[in-house]
Image (spheres, grey):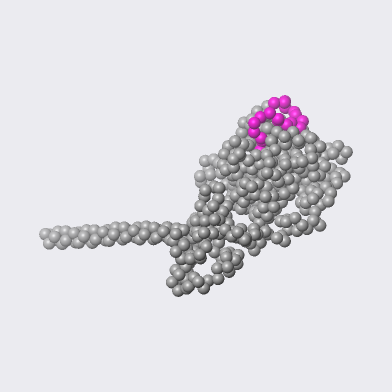
Amino acid sequence: MANNNNSNRYSSEKKRKFFKGKTFILLVGLVLGAGIMIAVYKTSVYFSSDESCMMCHVHPHAEDSWKLSKHVNNSSGVKTHCVACHLPPQNKTWDHYTAKAKLGIKDVWSYMTKDSADFNWNTKSELEHAVKYIPNESCKECHQNLFPEGITQDGITAHLYYDENEKKLDLQCISCHLDVGHYNPNYTHGKMTGLPGVEAGTVDTSMFFKEPAQITSFSNFQEQIPGTPVSIKMVAIPGGTFKMGSTEKEPFHKADEAPVRNVTVSPFFISEYEVTWDQYWAFYRNTMSEGRTPPETVYANNSNPDVDAISGPTPPFGFPDQGWGYGDRPAITMTHYAAETFCQWLSKKTGKKYRLPTEAEWEYAARGGTETPYFFTGNPKNFSDQGFWRKFFDAKTDSISSYVIYGKNSKNKTQTPDLVKANPFGLKNMLGNVMEYCADKYDPEAYSKGGENVTNPLVTEGTEWVIRGGDYTSDAADVRSAARNYTKHDAWLKTDPQQPKSIWWYSDIRGIGFRIVCEPDASLGAK
């Protein structure tokens, strides 16, 4: 027994020494590894400095021209360093460091084996050479605002065209802005010449509408905006009476949706889906302004058909489409004021009365003659992610996804209207995709005022505006036909980097848009 005990003690001691040795080696390895990583990082930082770049880039004027450029010599006091332009952004870690390694090896090799006196410096200053060493992602990383203060209207138009057509254009930012990184007194600013919609004289106007649509009956029509190639499909909605709001029996009912009342609305036309970027940019290009017309002036002008000049939006900050695309996607991030101004402009262009829908008109149109939570079959409890059982069972999406762009199917961005089916009135995206402005001010007790039976109600008192329909991030509970919401104007403006704050754009409110209503002429006899 004694021998066995001695043997066990020996074995345990041997194991202890073994693991102690392994632990020591592991700790040494970790320390050495961390040291190597820190050394590599410090080396990387050192060789990312402007001074280290100048060691290899021995062009006699490189440093002087860089210091005279707008990237260094500007009123903001911001100094742009060599690597900010010549390498992919650092948030693209792999691309950044692989590009850095390749360029570094090439620069060192050239420095050691070539004579700089033999270089053709003029050729290396040409655009064909520059595009190889200026990643477009780096330009966009810094210049998130395509429309800086002082930009000309030609510049705004060119940037809009580039932003809309970047994927199909064989152009980079540097294609027009070759002199921003290295000053050249003989350089002429580039232009996107010969591209449609960019320069005066290059636009093919043969497809532009000369006259607005002529309405001869109360039926659907395609509005034609004179002076543009843009049209808007308007759907005829017959007048009628419906039950507006929801009862406590409806899942996810909220207090401001009650009491339910009988509301009668007169006939009206409403756009098939939200105003698109193509339609909104037609307005922007036609009216773009560097001024700030007070909102009260615009709202007053909406009742004045004799207004001649309409001041349109100032340039947006950054990419108003959020990089999701333009075309038929809903125009977003504009303020209620901007939506009202669009209606005023469209009224002037067509000679008709365009405006935002009242809240009653909006819900009447959204329901499409139904009295259920949605205009399609389904219980909000089954579609919503809210509730205890959602911890164990997934919400249903089979029917709602055919009609609504919401949190479950949006891919976290707005979508084009062709992805959803229309409601019984032939309207798309009444629920989901983007919240839509109404003409009413928000009053949480609006439904309790005016009695059980009202005709064409409109709330004009309040500080915020009604918005309806939910958006691409919404839960199914918030895209019910009766669900109400409202603007938070001051809060939404807080992230606007401009001073003074824009009256046209919200920089970060991506889920807001609008659709339009046209009032029918009495001669049409609409009922």
> Which part of the image, by quadrant, shows the C terminus?
top right
Any magenta on residue 454?
A: yes
Residue 114 appearing in the image = yes
Q: Is residue 238 above or below residue 162?
A: above
Residue 19: x, y in percent? 25, 59
Q: Which residues are magenta?
A: 449-472
Rendered position, 474 above or below 61: above
* Residue drawn at 75 percent across, 41 percent down: 310
Q: Is residue 17 left or right of residue 60?
A: left
Residue drawn at point x = 39 percent, y = 60 percent: 43
Question: With respect to residue 5, does 403 lie above or below?
Answer: above
Front position in the image: 207 or 285: 285
In magenta segment, residue 175: no
In the drawing, does residue 389 fall left or right of residue 454?
left
Q: Nearer the viewer, residue 178 or 437?
A: 178
Q: Which is more toward the observer, 372 or 177? A: 177
Task: Kindly indicate the quadrant of the structure image that contains residue 306.
Answer: top right
- Rendered residue at 59%/36% (across/down): 490
Q: Main secondary structure of the magenta part?
A: loop
